[in-house]
Image (spheres, rainbow, N blue to C red):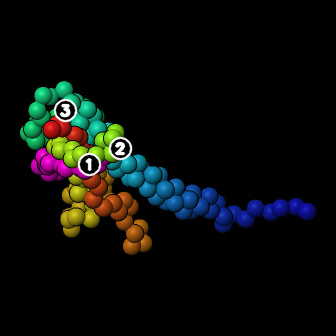
Amino acid sequence: MKTILRKDQSGVAAIEFSLVFALLFATFWAIISYALPFFLYQTMNHAVAEATRELVKYESPTPTNATDELKKQLNKFLPSAFFDKLEFPAPIIKPVDLTGNDEDGNPVTYSYKTLSIKVVYPGCNSSSLRTHCITPALNLLGASIPNLGPYTAETEIRLSRS
C-alpha cells in the first residue's frame, strides 16, 4: 500500500515540538527548583554540625561565638544570595540535670550545660511577594513550583559537666 503525504501537514512537527517542549521545560524547571533548596537544606545541616564541632575548641563558648562560627561555616558553602535569606535565632545555653545510677546502683545526678544552635530558611510561603524564594516560581495550572515551607537546621552541644 502506498502512503500519500498530505501537503497541509507540513507544520505538525513544529506544533508537536512546542507541546512536548512545554512539558519538558516544566519538568526541568521543577527539578532545578527543588534541587537548589535541597542543596541549601543539606548545606545548612552540614554547617550547623561543623559549627558545633568547631565550638569544642573554645574553652567556654558563648552564643556570640556560636553565631559567628555558624555564619563562618555557611559562608564557606553558600553564595551571598542564599546566605542573605537565612535567619539566625539567638543560640541558647541551658542547664540540664539528669539522674541515673552509678556502677554500684546508687542514684547520681549529672548536671551540664548545652548550647543549642539554629539556622532557619523561611521558605517561599512566608511572604506574599515570595521574596524568600531561591528560584523564581513557575505557576502552572494553579500549582506553584517550587512551593516550599520553612526549614530549620538545629543541633546541640554539651558544654560542661559539673
Please tell me how crowded label 2 is: few (under 14), some (14-19), or many (20+) other residues with Cα within 10 Å. few
Give the residue at the far right of this rendering.
1
Q: Is residue 78 in the magenta section?
A: no
Disc 2 vs disc 3: which is toward the camera? 3
Residue 6 % position (x, y): 73, 65
**Real-space Cα separation, disc 2 to disc 1, in angstroms:** 41 Å
In the visual, does 39 lie left or right of 63?
A: right
The kind of residue on which mark 1 rests is Pro
What residue is shown with label 2? 42
Q: Marks 2 and 3, how far apart in space?
A: 20 Å
Q: Position of residue 34 (x, y in %)?
A: 40, 53
Q: Badge 3 is on which residue? A: 55
Q: Nearer the viewer, mark 2 or mark 1?
A: 1
Q: Is residue 112 above or below residue 122?
A: above
Q: Could you say which is closer to the camera, residue 71 or residue 129? A: 71
Sequence-wise, the earlier of marks 2 and 1 is 2
Along the horizontal axis of the image, is 34 left or right of 55? right
Residue under the point 36% across and 59% down:
146
The magenta stretch spans residue 86:
yes
Please, is residue 88 above or below residue 137 in the view?
above
Secondary structure category for the residue under label 2: helix
Residue under numbered circle 1:
107
Q: Nearer the viewer, mark 1 or mark 3?
A: 1
* Disc 3 residue crowd, few under 14, some 14–19, many 20+, Cα 10 Å: some
Which residue does the image show at 22% across and 64% down from the upper left?
126
SS at mark 3 in the image? helix
> In percent of the image, x 27 and y 65: which residue is there?
125
What type is the residue that disc 2 sits on?
Gln
What span is in magenta? Answer: 85-101
Distance from label 1 to label 3 (Cα)? 31 Å
